[in-house]
């Protein structure tokens, strides 16, 4: 896993994910020693539209982490709106 990857975490990654979540990876934390096959990951939990809602530090089994790409869905603040048409006052 590298920065920017989007992963899907279920109980295959850890029993703490009874409710699966999507996470955008910030980094793996190599200075924390773990059991073989497990890793600490820092990342942002994502909501249904792909916006970050919480920063998390997660202890997960590497074999249970699923890498994937979320479809890019712009939030309400990013959507383009048509330009207003009408008279323009100058001066």
Image (cartoon, rainbow, N blue to C red):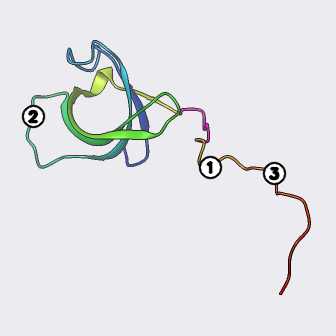
Can you tell which quarter of the image residue 42 is in?
top left
> For the magenta stretch, what is the residue range?
70-74
Q: CA distance from mark 2 to mark 3?
A: 53 Å
On the question of residue 1 being in view, the answer is no
Front tag of 3 and 1: 3
User: What kind of element bears circle 1?
Assistant: loop
Q: Is residue 11 above or below residue 81?
A: above
Q: Could you say which quadrant of the image residue 38 lies in?
A: top left
Secondary structure under tag 2 reads: loop
The rendered magenta stretch, by its main secondary structure, is classed as loop
Residue behind mark 2: 34
Left or right: residue 58 compared with residue 73: left
Q: Which residue has dot 1 on it?
A: 78
| Structural crowding at the residue carrying mark 3, measured as other residues with C-alpha within 10 Å and reported as few (<14), some (14–19) or many (≥20) | few
Q: Do residues under tags 1 and 2 come within 8 Å of each other at their CB atoms? A: no
Residue located 67% across and 46% down the image: 79
Q: Which mark is residue 82?
A: 3
Residue 35 vertical placement versus 12 (above, below): below
């Amino acid at each position: 896993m590298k920065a920017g990857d989007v992963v899907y975490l279920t109980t295959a990654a850890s029993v703490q994910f009874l409710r699966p979540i999507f996470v955008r990876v910030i980094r793996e934390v190599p200075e924390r020693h773990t059991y073989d096959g497990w890793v600490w990951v820092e990342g942002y939990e994502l909501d249904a539209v792909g916006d970050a809602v919480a920063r998390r530090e997660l202890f997960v089994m590497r074999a249970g982490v699923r890498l994937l790409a979320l479809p890019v869905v712009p939030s309400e603040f990013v959507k383009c709106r048509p330009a207003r048409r009408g008279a323009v006052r100058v001066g």
